[in-house]
């Protein structure tokens, strides 16, 4: 059986590198989205079903609220690509809602797996494998 390694990565580093969140001013994100997520948690208006896409619509905010309240066990999946070759345009390959919940909860780290060059991943996220 093949084992997939899981790593703990700083949420702030992913946010720094992720184009999805770089488009938005962090304070604006916290002001608008954080309050909506909190309202959904308090009202119990949650979405337990996975969503596709990440457009911050009604279902997405409910999904983030559900994850923030109930947690998750799956790591997010990053695609760091391979330096010198055409790579992914979106660092987060799977787990946008889990990542948004981690941002909402102000977690310091999140569990990740990745695809792409391992040395580049280690360099990007300051991973020291022994």
Image (cartoon, grey):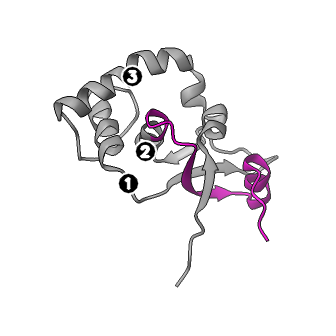
Circles 2, 1 touching at the beta carbon (< 8 Å):
yes
- Which tag, 2 or 1, sits closer to the chain's start? 1
> How far is the residue under mark 3 from the one under mark 2?
14 Å
What x and y, as percent, mark residue 112?
56, 55
Magenta stretch: includes residue 116: yes
Q: Is residue 96 left or right of residue 47?
A: right
Where's the C terminus, which quadrant? bottom right
10 Å neighbourhood of mark 2: few (<14), some, or many (≥20)? many
Label 1: how many Cα within 10 Å (few below 14, some 14–19, many 20+): few
Q: Give the image location of residue 45, x and y in percent.
A: 18, 33
The mark that comes first in sequence, 3 or 1, is 3
Classed neighbour count for the residue bearing mark 3: other residues with Cα under 10 Å, few (<14), some (14–19), many (≥20)? some
In-image side of 56 versus 85 (left or right) = left
How far apart are the two marked residues, 3 and 1, measured between alpha carbons?
20 Å
Kindly identify which numbered label has been placed on residue 98.
2
Residue interval drawn in magenta: 102-130
Inspect this view and state whether residue 57 appears.
no
* Percent of width and height locating residue 84: 82, 46
Residue under pointer 1: 72
User: Which residue is found at the position 39% from the left and 16% from the top?
Assistant: 32
* Side of 3 relative to 71 (left or right): right
């Amino acid at each position: 059986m093949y084992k997939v390694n899981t790593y703990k990565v700083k949420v702030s580093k992913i946010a720094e590198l992720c184009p999805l969140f770089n488009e938005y001013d962090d304070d604006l994100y916290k002001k608008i989205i954080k309050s909506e997520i909190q309202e959904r948690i308090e009202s119990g208006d949650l979405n337990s079903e996975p969503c596709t896409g990440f457009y911050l619509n009604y279902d997405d905010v409910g999904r983030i609220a559900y994850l923030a309240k109930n947690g998750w066990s799956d790591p997010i999946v990053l695609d760091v690509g391979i330096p010198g070759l055409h790579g992914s345009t979106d660092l987060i390959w799977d787990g946008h809602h889990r990542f948004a919940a981690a941002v909402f909860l102000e977690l310091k780290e999140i569990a990740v797996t990745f695809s792409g060059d391992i040395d580049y991943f280690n360099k990007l996220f300051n991973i020291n494998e022994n």
